[in-house]
């Protein structure tokens, strides 16, 4: 695949000249999964595609890809639909035909309503269709170290909130509850991505502390991203209301 390092952004990548707006391992997982599990010509939707790196990679694997955009900056020649993920969206938003796979990669944390986002994604799939979803893993060992020092993971620091709209922090139990409410079952769960700890004496201390945490603590300590392969079930999704509170 034509991956190249992004100039002046260590640890970040381009695909065929387009910025990859996720960890490269996450990007590669989606492309490899889709090309191995779906038939050639399967219908795929890349939600909030940025400039289109993932869209282009999926097209290169022979899939029939459409995308949505918030800002109209997609640079790949595929059907593209404007979609504000803070508002409900459905098949009428994206061409009226259901998809075999919807990709929601590193976008749900930018949404004001993650539960609504999942329900909208479910509406784009027929029964048995797939959603691949990823979001920062705020339970990783590195994120827990950041919690202890700063009171939040680095991916949800003030600058990330104000400039990158990281506004919805999702942990395993909460996210998986919303996944079930939206009418999905979990098929696969992965934790791609390597910690960027830098170099020098401080990085050695961080590595030692994180190594101890991985050995001593429970939970999803590996990987910078939390990634799910989800299948839409026959059961209709439901909302969690006041009656669920005690």
Image (cartoon, helix red, strand yellow):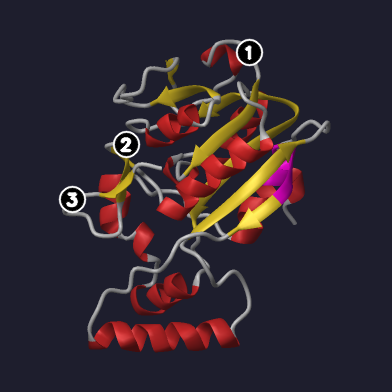
> Quarter-wise, where is residue 189 in the image?
bottom right
Examine the rendered structure and indicate whether residue 149 appears above or below residue 137: below
Q: Is residue 157 visible?
A: yes
Q: Is 184 covered by the magenta stretch?
A: yes
Residue 139 is covered by the magenta coloring = no
Left or right? Give the position of 71 relative to 61: left
Name the residue tied to disc 1.
97
Q: Residue 77's spot in the image, x, y percent? A: 37, 17
Range drawn in magenta? 179-187
Query: In front here: 88 or 12?
Result: 12
Mark 3 or 2, closer to the camera? 2
Name the residue beneath numbered marker 2. Answer: 16
Q: Which dot, 1 or 3, sits closer to the camera?
A: 3
Residue 177 coordinates in the image, percent (x, y): 69, 51
User: Could you say which disc has been placed on residue 7 in the image?
Assistant: 3
Characterize the local packing of mark 3: few (<14), some (14-19) or many (20 or more) Cα atoms within 10 angstroms.
few
């Amino acid at each position: 695949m034509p991956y190249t390092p992004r100039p002046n952004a260590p640890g970040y990548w381009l695909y065929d000249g387009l910025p990859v707006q996720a960890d490269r391992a996450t990007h590669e997982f989606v492309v490899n999964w889709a090309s191995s599990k779906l038939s050639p010509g399967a219908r795929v939707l890349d939600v909030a595609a940025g400039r289109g790196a993932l869209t282009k990679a999926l097209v290169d694997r022979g899939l029939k890809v459409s995308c949505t955009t918030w800002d109209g900056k997609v640079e790949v020649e595929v059907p593209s639909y404007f979609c504000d993920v803070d508002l409900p969206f459905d098949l009428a938003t994206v061409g009226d035909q259901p998809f075999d796979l919807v990709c929601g990669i590193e976008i749900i944390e930018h949404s004001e309503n993650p539960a609504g986002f999942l329900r909208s994604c479910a509406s784009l799939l027929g029964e048995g269709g797939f959603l691949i979803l990823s979001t920062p893993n705020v339970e990783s060992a590195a994120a827990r170290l950041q919690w202890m020092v700063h009171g939040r993971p680095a991916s949800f620091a003030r600058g990330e909130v104000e400039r990158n709209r990281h506004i919805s922090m999702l942990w395993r139990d909460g996210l998986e509850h919303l996944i079930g409410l939206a009418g999905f079952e979990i098929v696969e769960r992965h934790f791609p991505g390597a910690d960027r700890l830098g170099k020098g004496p401080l990085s050695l201390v961080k590595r030692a502390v994180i190594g101890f945490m991985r050995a001593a603590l429970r939970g999803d300590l590996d990987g910078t991203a939390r990634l799910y392969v989800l299948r839409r079930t026959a059961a209709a999704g439901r909302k969690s209301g006041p009656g669920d509170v005690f």
